[in-house]
Image (cartoon, rainbow, N blue to C red):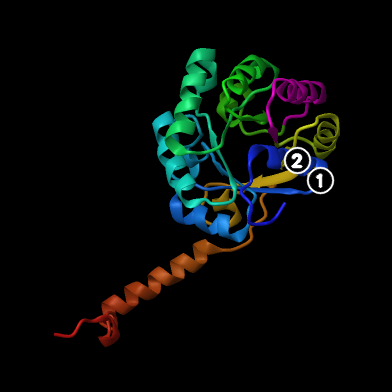
Amino acid sequence: MKENQRITVPRFTAMKLQGRKISMLTAYDFPTAKMLDEAGVDSILVGDTLAMVIQGQATTLPVTLDEMIYHGRMVSRAVERALVIVDLPFPTNHLGIHATVEHAARILKETEAQAVKLEGGADQAEVISALVNAGIPVMGHVGLRPQSVHTMGGFKVQRDEEVLLNDAKAVAQAGAFGIVLECIPATYAKLITEEIRIPTIGIGAGADCDGQVLVINDMLGLPTDCKPRFVKTYANLESTISDAVKSYCRDVQDGSFPGPEHTFAE
């Protein structure tokens, strides 16, 4: 695949067979998505994490379908190459098959993204199958499921190997084109990756997954309430932005900005 070719769902899935690791990051707005796309990321996830990193919520639960569509539209407008996936927010995929198909279809129609992602394993197989049969590509999500944070008792590593493997197999058999594995032991993620035919995208699941995803704010060192163990910070933009704002404030206060070069003549 040429690097400038648009990554479609079939091309994304084929990367596993090609042995090519898949890069994925979240984005929630036009300029961020544009930068990620031009830098060569394979897939951009408009995650319901926007509830936490953009809206300042304690969990992903409060974000609405309309808000996901709003942010998804901005991201898709910026992207020319990467595969754009939008999260189905809570509790969309628990409202029955017809409602879920309707909501997922709204996402594709109104954002121009190529796929949706939903949380759940074997319990969501029927929903995934219905979405795929309706022509809506689906990425699954097993392990830690942030939308079930209260049921799981917090953001905890999931260690039930049998449940994790059964969930992943059920998602693949239902027709999902890929699956996120979140916060599970690396040995379990390796086993799942070997057992299923679709790409696995890890977040806190070790290096043997077919790809990796991080929340962009975590990766860039922007302010967050916590830094999970699985995050690698590639920049410290919090410090960079803070220093720039302090310099601006000093320049305004001492009158050095705006200078002649920033001022219009008669």
Closer to the camera in the image, 123 or 20: 20
- Residue bearing the label numbered 1: 18
In this rendering, position of residue 97 left or right of residue 196: left
Work out whether residue 89 can be spotted: yes
Residue 237, x across and y down, in percent: 52, 63
Q: Amino acid at mark 1?
A: Gln
**Regarding mark 1 in the picture, which secondary structure is present there?**
helix
Q: How many marks?
A: 2
Closer to the camera in the image, 90 or 229: 90
Which residue lies at the image location 57% right of the left edge and 27% below the top edge?
136
Q: Residue furthest left?
A: 266
Q: Residues within 10 Å of mark 2 (few under 14, many from 20)?
A: some
Residue 159 magenta-highlighted: yes
Residue 192, x across and y down, in percent: 81, 31
- Residue 14 - label: 2
Residue 43, x across and y down, in percent: 62, 46
